[in-house]
Amino acid sequence: MLVVEDDPLVRMSAVDIVEDADFVAYEARNADQALRMLEAHPEISVLFTDIDMPGTMDGLALAHAVRQRWPHMTIIIASGHIRIEKGDMPDDGVFFPKPYASSTIRRALERVAPRLH
């Protein structure tokens, strides 16, 4: 699973949640780094991204780019500042407002990515 978050403390916390749920976690601080990571690691099948981050694209644009290039990727999007409508999400994407409880993310991971266990 790839965790994309520009805030190092929030990213570290998200990685801990992912690893505590027995998933392998990869990290990226922006969309450009995330795309390079996805190209280098074809075993990644879940994208967990924040929306608001600096760089060439935000997390929502990243999610759409990932959906086009890797159509079977599970996409989870989080934001503490932006609320998005279902129509703005990539197909089958899941949205969580921040702050999120680790138990909520863990249940979502187990529900949307059971094939990884």
Image (cartoon, rainbow, N blue to C red):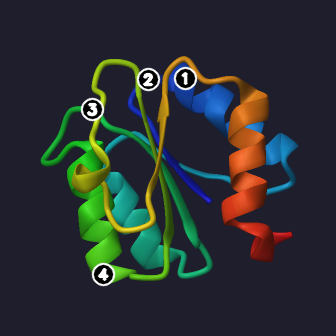
Q: Give SS at disc 2.
A: loop
Say what amino acid the circle numbered 3 marks.
Answer: Met
* Residue 73, image x, y percentages: 49, 74
The number of discs equals 4
Say what amino acid the circle numbered 2 marks.
Answer: Asp
Judge by depth and name the residue closer to the eye, 52 or 99.
Answer: 99
Above or below: residue 94 compared with residue 95: below
Say what amino acid the circle numbered 1 marks.
Answer: Val
- Determine which residue is flagged by label 4: 69
Q: Quadrant of the N terminus?
A: bottom right
Q: Give SS at disc 3.
A: loop
- Determine which residue is flagged by label 3: 53
On residue 55, the disc is none
Q: Real-space Cα distance between discs 2 and 3?
A: 8 Å
Q: Could you say which quadrant of the image residue 103 lies in?
A: top right
Q: Give SS at disc 4.
A: helix
Q: Residue at x 36, y 66 (%)?
A: 36
Q: Quadrant of the C terminus?
A: bottom right
Above or below: residue 71 compared with residue 59: below
On residue 10, the disc is 1
- Determine which residue is flagged by label 2: 7
Q: Real-space Cα distance between discs 4 and 1?
A: 27 Å
Please say if the residues under marks 1 and 2 sit with CB atoms less than 8 Å apart. Answer: yes
* Residue 111, image x, y percentages: 74, 59
| Callout 1 crowding tier (Cα within 10 Å): few <14, some 14–19, many ≥20 | some
Q: Residue at x 71, y 53 (%)?
A: 109
| Callout 4 crowding tier (Cα within 10 Å): few <14, some 14–19, many ≥20 | few
The earlier-in-sequence mark between 2 and 3 is 2
Q: Real-space Cα distance between discs 4 and 2?
A: 26 Å
